[in-house]
Amino acid sequence: MTMRVADYIAKRLLERGARTVFMLNGGMMMHLVDTLGRHGGLAYVAQHHEQASAMAADGYARRSGELGVCYATSGPGATNLVTGIAGAWQDSTPVLFLTGQSKSTQTIQKSGIEGLRQYGTFEVDVVPVVQSLTKYAVMVLDPKTIRYHLEKALHLATTGRPGPVLLDLPLDIQGAQIDPDALQGFMPEDQPSAAMTPAQLATLSQLLVGAKRPLILAGQGIRCAGAVDAFHQLVDQLNIPVATTQLGKDTLPYAHPRFVGHPGPKGDRPGNLAIQTADLILSIGCSLHAQTTGWENELFAPDAIKVQIELDAAVLAREQIGVSLKIQAGAQEVIDSLLAQKLQLKTNDAWRDCCASWKDRFQVAKEPHDTDGPAINFYEFAEALSRQLGNDACIVADAGSAFYVMGQALRLKQGQRFISSGSLGAMGFALPAATGAAATGLAGSTVCVTGDGSLMTNLHELATMKEYQLDLKLFVVNNDGYVSMRNTQRDFCAGHYVGADADSGVFIPAIGALADAFGLPYIRCESAAELEEQIREALAVKGPVVCEIVAMRDQKIIPAVISVKLPDGRMRSAPLHNMYPHLSDEVLAQELARATAQ
């Protein structure tokens, strides 16, 4: 029996476990859209910008652990996806993008004319645009090849290091009739999978047994591999301190006795002290990016032997920070192998106690945050939110100050999820990603934390919150625009503010009026005294709600590794352990000596 290509795709997606498509309607995706609602179980969320649809599919995939699916039309619809595709690419999120296209006979690819800018109506040849941001991107020009291309795309998106894929589907191909039984499928080539060798396992085991101050650096690769539970077993078995990256923040809860902190230039003091004094760093599923290691490579963990467990060979090829042992393997495999070893480590209690004391003494909440004014300090909000969220909450943080403060100060509990645009840092990511996370229908509220500046970049998704009555609590931290850029322009541009706030050209409407215009419940919190009660009220709302947090205009991100501008214009950063506000030279020396004496 024959069927439309578009119907075949919908059927295969359902068989694959997909349940929701994020999309914005368009003429060149007519047949793709027509299948939605016709195939039981395949729902859709209609959004108001393709960038939002892409980010929603990303959030859906991260929250659910399943494939995200996004449909978009040709031309501007396809190009609007690019930022969302880039985020999924860098953060390793499996998302299938299907784009509509002009009829195959009216496409640049079919014309054979080199240098032709456009042939079909609203046409853009999107495949070369996204090839560097996807694991697979192709225009389907023969309906009989749809099974092959779809199976290949799904396979690549979800195996190895996950990532986005894109199929560009001309209108006539979408509507073409095919016989599913006559289609040729995709068979992955037999290639040896990346695996740890017995010699590497032996070396790693020896390093762990011989280390006095070992530290695990846990990245998102652990969750991508589905290895979070096994990782918890490994931490308990090895009984050594753990630091997490921004993307790996929800790999281990804050209250776990071996959790230390979050290293990086805008990480926290405990995480940085631990990583700078460790004699062995075991990095699992972490790219060792500058967001974690800092910008001065030679100053990162100078006395540590560094071991990197990473599936991506291109990441392992980097040579910035002197990794001694590189193992190309999946996190699950390595963790299982280490568990089977049942290693007896020499790590003493003094090292564990030292890390635990840093975690207690140098809490982010204890840093000298300015809380004297009437407006709310962002860190006060993060602390209050941490106390009130349930164990099944999913927190989605935006870029800028929301990215840094929530990464530093949010104390995650067992079972909570944390999602951010960790690699790309896209402003406006949080709200659409949160709509995707909420659309999974999983237990627990989705809590979105954004700034007033970031909100404006995807403001239209308030309509999606309203239309689908998502269990989404949107906290808008109002600090008059772009506080991160104001801080940069204050520190390095002599206070010459451009496009950063109301006084320099950035107008942001009243948040309450916006919520009212979209028909959403609204709560306004203006002082620290009412913070706990207002957060509690917002979390208790059934369905969507907007809660405005009137925050300090000049929010400082502390602690932080600061940079200085050299006379020749270059920037120079301090080592990770020397964070601002600086400890006295005497105290810092004592802490470093206390650790390395173990």
Image: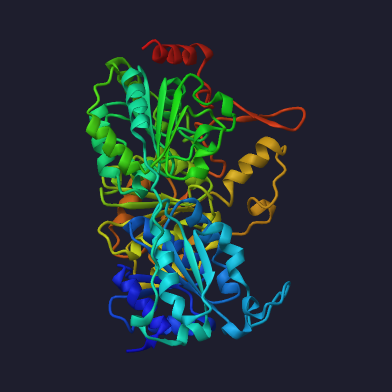
> Which residue is outermost to the front?
190
Which quarter of the figure has residue 122? bottom right
Q: Quadrant of the C terminus?
A: top left
From the viewer's perspective, is residue 8 above or below residue 134?
Answer: below
Which quarter of the figure has residue 366? top left
For the point 56% across and 33% down, the residue is: 319
Q: Quadrant of the N terminus?
A: bottom left
State left or right for residue 428 relative to residue 282.
right
| Color style of the picture | rainbow
State left or right for residue 138 relative to residue 529.
right
Q: Find residue 189 and report its horizontal and vertical position in percent.
A: 41, 58
State left or right for residue 104 relative to residue 261.
right
Q: Is residue 457 visible?
A: yes
For the point 28% across and 76% down, the residue is: 41
From the viewer's perspective, is residue 376 above or below residue 324?
Answer: below
Question: In the image shown, does 445 or 594 lie closer to the viewer?
Answer: 594
Question: In the image shown, does 217 or 554 lie closer to the viewer?
Answer: 217
Question: In the image shown, does 30 or 163 lie closer to the viewer?
Answer: 163
From the viewer's perspective, is residue 573 above or below residue 89?
Answer: above
Q: Find residue 163 and report its horizontal and vertical position in percent.
A: 45, 56
Q: Find residue 98 and report its horizontal and vertical position in percent.
A: 47, 72
For the point 58% across and 44% down, the residue is: 484
Q: Is residue 556 visible?
A: no
For the point 51% across and 86% down, the residue is: 172
Q: Find residue 403 and report its horizontal and vertical position in percent.
A: 48, 46
Question: In the image shown, does 97 or 512 lie closer to the viewer?
Answer: 97
Which quarter of the figure has residue 569? top right
> Which residue is outermost to the right?
568
From the viewer's perspective, is residue 253 above or below residue 180?
Answer: above
